[in-house]
Each structure stands twice: as structure tokens, then as C-alpha cells.
Amino acid sequence: MKIAVLPGDGIGPEIVAEAVKALQALDLRFELETAVVGGAAFEATGHPLPEATLKLAKAADAVLFGAVGDWKYDKLERALRPEQAILGLRKELGLFANFRPAICHAQLTDASSLKPELVAGLDILIIRELTGDIYFGQPRGRRSAPDGHFPGAEEAFDTMRYSRPEIERIAHVAFQAARKRGGRLTSVDKANVLETFQFWKDVVSEVHAQYPDVQLDHLYVDNAAMQLVKAPKQFDVIVTGNMFGDILSDAAAMLTGSIGMLPSASLDADNKGLYEPSHGSAPDIAGKGVANPLATILSAAMMLRFSLNQEEAATRLEAAVQGVLEGGLRTGDIASAGCRVVGTQAMGDAVAARLRAQR
Ligand code: NAD
């Protein structure tokens, strides 16, 4: 099992080190190879996604990714900014399906910004299409300056588009995921206003004919946003396009208490994937040893399950995280009364110790 480890910037190296620690405590055989990405790669090579890093990611069975970005690169030309590395990896590796589970751990209901009864037991899965939509349409008319801004411009626009095969493949992934869970899929669109999303709705409905055992419903994105904060437990699996998925999954993140708890997987057609926490590089807390490593550790569990076929190890890792939370350990972002607040390394040590104790 060859894993490319790309820590990146900000808190990336701190949280990835703890995920690697947890993997090593599992007593499985991994070949781990680390490479620079994002701002760190720009500093070292002049490019956020160097050829050698891309080659390593392509050759590996899975990629464990930290986070990229720092405000200090905001003045750089867009193509050289750290965030281009993650967009480039998604595109080059064909990672079209982004899985973002939003699970509210029983011990963390108080950390949510919603009332505990609305989120206790929450377990939803948002599947976001990742390589199409307005983010990859033609930025026609863009005449931005090298720093990405528009001095003196009168307009700017991006084009939204989806092709039938792009919608069909994400719909199949979503129906199959729903089949393995509660059997309910909600497709989120804006078919009342956008042609692209009437097309999306039609194609998802056509694919549904192959999954009669899954219950499908459709929701406009504005209503979906409202329902997510009104009664989030009504959902099982949500599938949506790139931009709506970007926004809704961050909203769902807060339902669970902290973005520091949320893992994600981005998969290609063969289940090879890139695994990363849902949050960014958090430059405000980088180097302080306070970042929550659990989203990255839980991303490693998703990696074991989806790309490395190690379901049993994935379950053990998730159980170890659960056990540590039950034991009352918290990083600052999920702290509550009566709990012991620890730093990044101590949290990683506790998860690894639980795994070793299970052996
Ligand atoms: P962010 O997710 O990095 O941080 C938002 C807030 O959440 C901050 O207050 C931060 O301290 C906190 N936070 C995030 N992760 C945490 C953790 N593990 N433990 C405790 N607290 C945590 O989002 P941002 O501040 O908007 O962006 C910072 C940088 O990250 C930007 O350069 C942005 O472009 C980049 N970014 C990268 C990715 C990625 O690598 N995939 C994703 C999102 C943002």
C-alpha cells in the first residue's frame, strides 16, 4: 500500500504528522513517501504542484493531504498560488467525487451552533461533484491583471456547464452510496433558474431508473441550505454540483461542532483517492500546536476504507477516535466544560495509544 503524503502549508504538517502516527500504530504495512505541495512547494521549486509531487501522487494507491494556502501568497499570480495545487491534483488525478460526511459525535453536541436535539445523532453524507461546473467553465472575458484582480474593468464572468457523462457518473456514485446507507438521496439543484441545473435534474432522474430501491427527491439549493440548518437529520445522502457542494458542505461542517472534525475523500472512477480534512491551512493557528488533528485522522480512516480495502482497520481507527472523545480529551476548537484540553500532538498520541492497546 503506497501512500503519497503531502502535508502542505500552515497546520498541514502538524495534523498530517498525527495521521501518519495513527496509521503507523495500526500495524499494517505501508510505504509512505512525502513530497512538498502548495506554498511550501512554491518556496522550494517555484511551483505549487511540482512535477515530482504530481508523479508521486499518480504512482501511489492513495494520497494523504494536509492543507495549502497562506494569506502571504494573495498577491501572487493565480496560477502560482498554493490553492492551485489542490485544483491541479483533482484535475490530473480525475478526482470527480468528493465525499464529505457530517457526523455529530454524541460527545460533541454542545460544540454545535445548533440546539443539541437538532444535531444529536446526525449522520449525513454530502457528495459534491468536483471537476465540473462554474469552477472549470471558461472564464471568458476575464482580463485580470497578473495578481488576479480587475483594475478598471467593467465586467467579469465565468460560465457554468455540465456534460451528460459528468452528471451520470456522479449520480451513479451517489445512488450507490445511498444504497449502502439509509437508501435516500436528495439531489440539490437550481433548476428553476439555471439551464445547467434543469439538465442536472433531468439526468439524475434518468439514472434513478437503475436504482429503484433508492428514494430520490430534488431540492433547490436555497431551500436545501435552509433545511440543513432547520432539520439536518431529515437528510441521508445529498448530491450536488461543485459550487453548491462547496457552500453546503461548509454549512454542514458547522452542524457538527468544528470544521476540525470533518474528513473528506475525493475519488476517481477506480476508487483511488485523495484524503484531506475539510478545513484549510488555518494560518492563524499554524505552529502553535493547537490544531485539531482528528479530521485528518478520520480522513486516513476513509483512505483505508475506500482506496486500500482495509475496512477493519478503518473501523478500528474510527473507534479509537471515538474512544478518545469519550475519555474526555478535546482540542481547543471542541472544548467544553469538564473536558481536558490538549494540543495537536497529545491528541494524536492518545489515538495511537488506543490503537496499540487494541492490538
Ligand atoms: P480555514 O479552514 O483554514 O480556517 C477557518 C477557521 O477554522 C480558522 O479560524 C482556523 O483556525 C479554524 N480551523 C481550521 N482548521 C482547524 C483545525 N484543524 N483545528 C482547529 N481550528 C481549525 O479557512 P480559511 O481561514 O478561510 O483559509 C486559510 C487558508 O486555507 C487560505 O489560504 C485558503 O485558501 C486555504 N484553504 C485551503 C484548503 C485546502 O487545502 N483544501 C481548503 C480551504 C481553505
Image (spheres, rainbow, N blue to C red):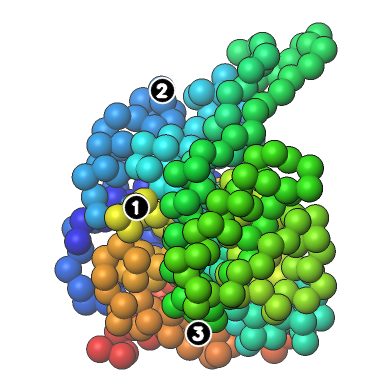
Q: Amino acid at mark 3?
A: Gln
The answer to whether marks 3 and 1 mark residues whose Cβ atoms lie closer than 8 Å is no
**Coordinates of residue 290 in the picture (x, y in percent):** 58, 63
Quarter of the figure with the C terminus: bottom left
> Which residue is found at the position 50% from the left and 43% from the top?
164
> Residue 90 at x, y = what percent?
43, 42
> Who comes first in sequence, dot 1 or dot 2?
2
Q: Which mark is residue 345?
A: none
10 Å neighbourhood of mark 3: few (<14), some, or many (≥20)? Answer: some
Q: Which residue is mark 2?
A: 46
Q: Is residue 257 left or right of residue 330?
A: right
- Give the structural element (helix, strand or loop) at label 3: helix
Residue at the far top: name it: 152
Query: In front of the other: label 2 or label 3?
Result: 3
Query: As shown in the figure, which amino acid type bears the numbered disc 2?
Result: Gly
Mark 2–mark 3 distance (CA, rounded to whole Å): 41 Å
| Secondary structure of residue under mark 2 | loop
Tell which circle, 3 or 1, labels the residue nearer the N-terminal end. Answer: 1
Reading the image, the residue beneath label 3 is 322
Q: Quadrant of residue 118?
A: bottom right
Callout 1: SS = loop
In the foreground, 173 or 8 = 173
CA–CA distance in space, label 1 to label 2: 31 Å
Amino acid type of the residue tagged 1 in the rendering: Ala
**Total count of labels:** 3
Above or below, comparing residue 35 to residue 336 in the picture: above
Q: Is residue 192 left or right of residue 171?
A: right
Tell me residue 1's x, y (percent).
19, 61
Q: Say which of 136 and 253 sits in front.
A: 136
Task: Say whether residue 323 is visible.
Answer: yes
Instruction: State which mark lies toward you, 1 or 2.
Output: 1
